[in-house]
Image (spheres, rainbow, N blue to C red):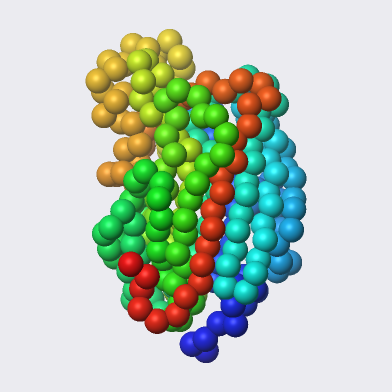
Amino acid sequence: MTALAGMHAVLHQRSLSLGIEYGNVHGFFSDAKAHPHAEAKAFDGGVRELTGDLRGASVRMEDRVQIDSDHLSRRLTFTMLDDARLYDLVSRFVVIDRSGVREGWINGQAVGHRARSVYHQFPASEAVVPVGHAHWLRARFRVEGELPPGMAHVAYIRDEASTHEGNRWILHHRLIALPHGDNLALRGCNPRFNRPVPAALNHRVPLALRRALYRIREARWPHAPIMAVAHARWRAGQQVTLVTDLCLSHGDRPQ
């Protein structure tokens, strides 16, 4: 089949799925892990509420999705239940290109699918990814609310490993903490050591080395055994909304 009958068909055919994530040095919350059977039912939009509880970051999430023909509008609101330290907050989209040959686009440049799982991340504006057999999703991003110092508004596309369904693209609308002062913490990213480096040891590692390890698994070395993450401080009750608008089109890739 080469044609899709609008955004509802994209969702029902599992060519597009929506997720939520947030994290810090201690780990990350994923709605897919918190509700592993949620994808069994086709998503038709609406409102859902979730609560995540990581060490140092308890967060309430309200996810509002409206679907209309070839458009999907998502408002994902994060509210801090306590004072929190966060690395990122993410509105997540997984997109399947069933043609298996097309490129994505972000920040004015084409990104080929090489199954490298590298994050092509830039200040948030818009991105385009192939979906289904011959369609495209153009995503536009904005943020509402007050961000703490050192938190950046970005987006990325990632060429995740292909499956029997086609090429998997990960599209993230993201708030991320940037290195600032001495806010970098190391964590192991290996099954034998998948946890934060003890604070006393972390501060003995030169700041220059921790800066070099910041986002190393995302930007340069996806299988690095260790990575540094930054943290931004959020106040209890502080709220932010990630707004993502998706538009479905057919034909040439939108520029």
The percent position of residue 113, horizontal first and vertical second, equals 33, 65
Instruction: Examine the rendering and report whether any part of residue 113 can be seen.
Output: no
Asked which quadrant contains residue 65, the reply is bottom right
The answer to whether 233 is drawn above or below residue 52 in the figure is above
What's the residue at 42%, 25% (across, down)?
150
What's the residue at 27%, 15% (across, down)?
206
The percent position of residue 253, horizontal first and vertical second, equals 36, 73
- Quarter of the image that includes the C terminus: bottom left
User: Relative to 180, is 194 on the left or the right?
Assistant: right
The answer to whether 119 is drawn above or below residue 201 in the figure is below
Asked which quadrant contains residue 154, the reply is top left
Q: Nearer the viewer, residue 250 or 9?
A: 250
User: Relative to 12, is 165 on the left or the right?
Assistant: left
What's the residue at 50%, 46% (across, down)?
142
Instruction: Examine the rendering and report whether any part of residue 245 can be seen.
Output: yes
User: Relative to 131, is 252 on the left or the right?
Assistant: left
Q: Nearer the viewer, residue 60 or 99?
A: 60
The percent position of residue 195, horizontal first and vertical second, equals 50, 29
The answer to whether 16 is drawn above or below residue 165 in the figure is above
What's the residue at 40%, 50% (across, down)?
125
Asked which quadrant contains residue 220, the reply is top left
